Structure formats: structure tokens, C-alpha cells
Amino acid sequence: MSLEAFLADCPPCPPSLPASLAAFLAKHRSPADAADHGDPGSASNRLSRPLAVVTSGGTTVPLERRCVRFIDNFSEGRRGALSAERLLAAGYAVVFLTRAGSAQPFSGGMEPAEALPGLLELAADGSVQVRPSRQPDLGPLLAKSEGARRAGALLTLPFTTVFDYLTYLKAIADAVAPYGPQAMFYLAAAVSDFYIPWGRLDEHKIQSLGGREGLRLELEAVPKALGVLRASWAPGAFVVSFKLETDEGLLMAKAGAALDRYDVHAVVANVLDTRKDTVVVVTKGQDGAGPKAHRIDRAPREEHIEDQLVATIAQMHRDFADQMQDR
Amino acid sequence: MSLEAFLADCPPCPPSLPASLAAFLAKHRSPADAADHGDPGSASNRLSRPLAVVTSGGTTVPLERRCVRFIDNFSEGRRGALSAERLLAAGYAVVFLTRAGSAQPFSGGMEPAEALPGLLELAADGSVQVRPSRQPDLGPLLAKSEGARRAGALLTLPFTTVFDYLTYLKAIADAVAPYGPQAMFYLAAAVSDFYIPWGRLDEHKIQSLGGREGLRLELEAVPKALGVLRASWAPGAFVVSFKLETDEGLLMAKAGAALDRYDVHAVVANVLDTRKDTVVVVTKGQDGAGPKAHRIDRAPREEHIEDQLVATIAQMHRDFADQMQDR
């Protein structure tokens, strides 16, 4: 199925989503530009800060329309959440397209299972207070969160299914395209490869047939959005995609293939077991040379590899935007 | 596949699980009984409080051994978590077999997405404090949590896959069986109906084949554990199962069939869209009469229907235990 046919078959994007995007982008247009060139289609659109569209968490594939069962992709959404935090700290406006319930910026890596007792305690007067041991890490986190909130720099858009994800990504690309190289797509979400078309899904919960009978699921390939995003949805934007494999032997070949096939500007390649310690940023070589690999290792003193990763990617985005402006 | 063959094909249960169960149960044996009849196989095993095994959250079905993709069941685990809280408050010792990352007792319904900024704020002196608006609900919750912790009344055992779930449930049933009617199984977990046997799973991430090719998954029926739990794993225990459907028309027939087929003592039946407002507790009629339905509706002033549900089920369990003792 083509991407166009896929999107036409999906439940439609809620109209509130383009509206909240438009309001968010309007807030971050350069004041002079907003006054002089009010037309968002104008080539002179300027933002007062760079823009990152960060996608995060796994998409689901429903097996029923009123969904009880679904195919999911393993992803806690931590890379996306930690990256969004660091992009905000670096002065970006961030559209955070996030799996509902996955990790969020400024959550301090708190798991729902840890819940309240690990964080809070009853004081002698019966009031609830933060455990003193948590004060040192929570203070700076809340200060950063408050800073991002005051700047209005974070727009969070939650998704669940692969249908949501691709329709929302299209709406975001449409809204962001006029800002050309000022925008970066940082596509860390784990998008389903196979799905059952919405039109073929049963309304109700699949009934087990009793006895020994099994179930056969016929899945179709999800059309790839990366190439279309690059070529026609937002051709001026800087696009970074992510590649996660369990088999290290396949990783570099697949990252190189993604560069060639989808024409993205960089691929962040990582292996499931070592993804918190090592990533490789793969970019195209110049003048027909093979792909360039820039390996990043988490230093022992670093809590999260995303500090270095985001610094590297943000620098690439700045270089790209400068280059585009010089043309 | 039979349940025995299924369990033999599963990754084995970690030995720490039976060990922590044994320690937990030893803590809750009646002091007199522990001194007089140290043999856990003895018919006179007495617990100092009733015991509930609460299962909660959805099981996953891995599509690869080193799991990137899996089939999941929709379940936030809120019913199980709220029920465990109320059973603890009613004096039960609770073994909480819970999907990792799903709702936990005493979490105050906090979603990970709500995260810290909704809960905490920076005080003028730079310290982190609980938002005053959250004090009234968090205080009592923490006090109850602290009470359960001091009593050592909650043992939390996390699972992820359907393989974990059924092997752990078997280990729990083995440990709990000697306590007969003092134990209740409150089986609120959403267990997968279909799975791919561990022996057939690929080691690495399934590769998408490129182009237009799809994927065919051949799933087998997960063997039903309910009947075996009742008939042979823990034949003396009180067993409550749960039935969730999206189609109200099927619900009572399926609940009645579960009573007949698995010989459980009660089925809590609910419909996906109204599960927080209405449940029906279905039990066998006496002397061959049809099933009895006891409908519970959440009163407008009640925050959670689990208050009434747990009160009803705990009363049924007490009646059952008294009846067994009188025989």
C-alpha cells in the first residue's frame, strides 16, 4: 500500500492538532518577521529559535478496532525524552510526538512502579514531603522544566497507534515545512514495520475459538514515511532517523541503506543491548565516498549518552542551516 | 499444547521467586501454628491473616526472543492495583503478580506522563516541595502505604511475558496450596489468548523484507490455566476470575461458561467502555439453578468501584472459608 493510500484509510487526524501546532509556531516566529511577513507560506519565515520535532516511544498496531489486543514495539521512550530535555536546554522549541504513557522530559527517569513511596514521605506533622535524598537531583530538573514551561518551548502531542503516528507526523510536517532548514526532525520513535489495515480490522475483541485452534494474522508492510518526508512533506528540513537492531552485524549496512534509500541527513545507529552506552551517527560521505561513521561512547562520569548525542546532532543541524542560508 | 507442555517449553522460573514466596508466607503464619506444626504440608497450616494472590496488567507475547516486538493486551492494571490496596486495608496479605510498569498500589493513579511537574514545585528557598493541592489525597495514601510496608503485607512480583506469568502463577499456587481456603486467587490480569511457542521464536529482530511484502504470524492458543489451578494446583483455594469484553451481548454467556468450564467460585464480568462504573459478580446458582448475577454500580460519590467490589469478594471469600472449616 502506498503512503497516500495508507493515510486515506486511517482514522482522520483530530482538527485540534493542526490548530495547536499553528499556535505553537506563531509563538516562536521572530517578532520582526511576524510583523513584516505575516504569510506563513512566505520564504522569509523566521523563527526566534530553532525547532525540533522529536518523535519518541513505540507505535502500536491494533488487532481490533475497539482495541484490546495490539502489537507493540519495545521502547520506553527514554532516548526521545532525554533528547527533548537537552534540545530545550540548547534553546530549541520542541514538538514532542510521544507515545502516550512513555517517558517524558523532566520526569527524572521515574518509573510508574517506583511510584510515590520512593519519592515522598510523611513528615512528623502529617504533611507530605519529598524525601531529602531526592532533593539534589529533583531541584535542577524542576527548574529546567519550569524554564521550558515559561518559554512555552515544549508542545507535547501524544499518540498510540501507527495510524495516529503517521497522520500526526504528516500534519506536523505540513505545519513545519515553511520554516525550511530551521526545523529538524529527530525521529526516535520505534515505528511498526507491519500492520493490519484499519479497513480490515474487526470491530470487537477477537474471540478465541476454544479448544486447540490458533490464530493466523496476515500483516502488511507499513509504508515508509521517511523518504516521503524528505522528498515532499518537508524537503527543506534537516532529518535524523534512528536505527535499532539486536544484531550488531547488520547495523552499519542497514544504517547506510537508510541514508541511501530515504536521503536523510543522518542516521543514529544503535544496538539494543548497548544503546545506553554507544551510538554511531552515520552521515553521507562527500563526493560519492562511502558513509561516515561518528561513534559516541558514554563517558563513565556521564549519566546519559544523550548529552553528547544531542550536542553532535545540534551542531550538524546548525552547520546545515548555515549552509542552506549561504546558498 | 497442554499446559504441562507449555510450561516445559517456557524459560524456567527464577529460583529467587519461590524463595521470596516462602519467606513471605512464613512471616504470615500464625505464631502458635508456626511453633506447633512447622511442616508446611500439614493440614493445620494457619495464617495470621487471609491471603490474596492478585494478578494485574496484561501479559505480552514476544515475536522475537530478544524482544523488540510483542503482542500486548490492553490493561493499565488499575483494577488490580486498586483492589490490592483495598485488600491490604481489609487485613489481607497480598501477593501482587503485576505487569512490570503497570499501575501499582498506593500510586494515587499517577501516570508517568503526569510526571513530576504536576506533583512537585520549587519553593522560594529552592527546595522541592509537594504542590499544596496534592497534599489532601497524598497524605492518607502514603499513610496506608507505610502501614502495609510495616506489616510486610505486600509481596510484589513483576512479570512481562505470558511465559513469565504462567510459570510464576504455578510457583505461587504451589506455595499457597497448603493454606487451602485461607487463600484467594483474584485473577485480574489480562492473559494473552494466542502466542508463538518459545521454541519457534527467532533469536533476533524480525527483518522487514523491503518492498511490499508482509508478514504472516501463526499463533497457537495459550493453554487455559484456570481449570488446572482449580482442579489440581490449589484445589482448596477460593478462585475469582475476570472477564472483559467489548461486546456486552457476549458478556454474561462468557462469564457463565467460565464458571462451568473452569469451576471458579466467582467471575467478575465487565465491559471495556463501562468497566470503571459497572461490574457484575457471577456465581453458581445453588442446586443446579443457573448462575447468579450480583451487579455493582459505582455510586456518584465513590471515586473507585473497587471499594464495593473488594468488599463483596472479601465477604464471599470469608463465607467460603467458614463453610470449608465447618465441614
Image (tube, coloured by chain):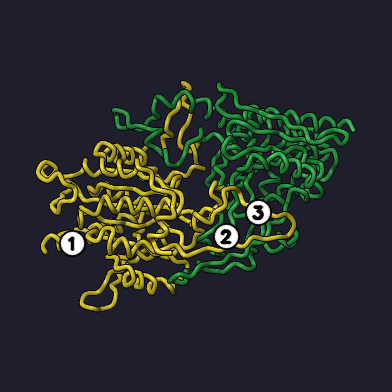
Chain colours: A yellow, B green
Q: Is residue B162 above or below residue A253?
A: above
Please indicate whether residue B45 sits to the left or right of residue A290 in the image: right
Q: Report x, y in % for residue A33.
A: 12, 45
- Chain letter of mark 1 equals A
- Of label 3 and label 2, which has the lower sequence position? 2
The residue at which mark 1 appears reads as A319
Query: How would you rate the neighbour count of disc 3 (Cα within 10 Å): few for under 14, some for 14-19, many for 20 or more?
Result: many
* Total count of labels: 3
For residue B26, say whether it is visible.
Answer: no
Marks 1/2: CA distance? 42 Å
> Based on the displayed image, in which of its 4 quarters is residue B311 positioned?
top right
Query: Residue B62: which numbered mark, if any?
Result: 2
The residue at which mark 3 appears reads as B193
Query: How would you rate the neighbour count of disc 1 (Cα within 10 Å): few for under 14, some for 14-19, many for 20 or more?
Result: few
- Front residue of this view, candidates B237 and A238: A238
- Is disc 3 in the same subunit as disc 2? yes
Q: Residue furthest right?
A: B327
Q: Amino acid at mark 1?
A: Asp
Marks 3/2: CA distance? 13 Å
Query: CB atoms at circles 3 and 2 under 8 Å apart?
Result: no
Name the residue rendered at 56%, 48% in the picture.
A203
Query: CB atoms at circles 1 and 3 under 8 Å apart?
Result: no
SS for dot 1:
helix
Discs 1/3, front:
3
For residue B47, say whether it is visible.
Answer: yes
- Front residue of this view, candidates A66 and B78: A66
Q: Report x, y in % for residue A12.
A: 40, 48
- Front residue of this view, candidates A114 and B74: B74
Q: Amino acid at mark 3?
A: Asp
Q: On the rendered image, what quadrant is the C terminus of chain B found in?
A: top right
Q: Report x, y in % for residue A55.
A: 36, 53
Marks 1/3: CA distance? 52 Å
